[in-house]
Image (tube, helix red, strand yellow):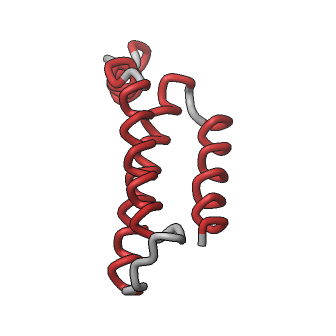
Amino acid sequence: MVTLFSLLTALPAVLALHLLEPELVLPAFSILLFVEAAFAVIAARLLQVPDNAERITLWDLAGGFALIGCAAAMFGEPDQAALYLSEQGSPSPASRP
């Protein structure tokens, strides 16, 4: 289970590093981790595995994903990402009449 979630985290993170602008990598990574935390919570609710203090549970993974997602969101600069995205959505000067 931990291997599956590790792969689901590592592959999109590597793709984000190669495909996104540097300002957008941490915000995208934090969103990815929050989504994975939500999936881990849904899986934990559906599987109903008994709690065991000696093993890592899906609840532990969900908490870890949420914690790392919060850290990535804090270290990222959301104002730079918002500025970059707002510039991408505005029409370019050459296309104005």
Whether residue 97 appears in this view of the structure is yes
Q: Residue furthest front?
A: 54
* Nearest the eye: 18 or 97: 18
Does residue 91 appear in the picture of this structure?
Answer: no
Would you place residue 17 above or below residue 56 in this image?
Answer: above
Q: Nearer the viewer, residue 6 or 52?
A: 52
Task: Return the x and y of residue 89 as percentages of the image width and height.
Answer: 35, 29
Q: Is residue 18 above or below residue 59?
A: above
* Residue 71, quarter of picture: top left
Residue 53, relative to residue 97: is it above or below? below
Residue drawn 48% across the image and 32% down it: 26
The quarter of the displayed image where residue 86 is located? top left
Work out whether 61 lies above or below 85: below
**Residue name at image x 39 percent, y 21 percent:** 77
Query: Which residue appears at 52% of the width and 70% of the height?
Result: 54
Image location of residue 34, percent across then percent down: 38, 52
Which part of the image, by quadrant, shows the N terminus? bottom right
Residue 72 left/right relative to 90: right
Q: Residue at x 48, y 30 (%)?
A: 24
Q: Which quarter of the rendered picture does the C terminus lie within?
A: top left
Residue 87 in percent (x, y) is at 37, 21
Quadrant of residue 42 within the rendered picture:
bottom left
Question: Along the line of sight, which residue is nearer the eye, 8 or 81?
Answer: 8
How many numbered marks does the figure carry? 0
x and y percent of residue 6 in the render? Answer: 62, 58
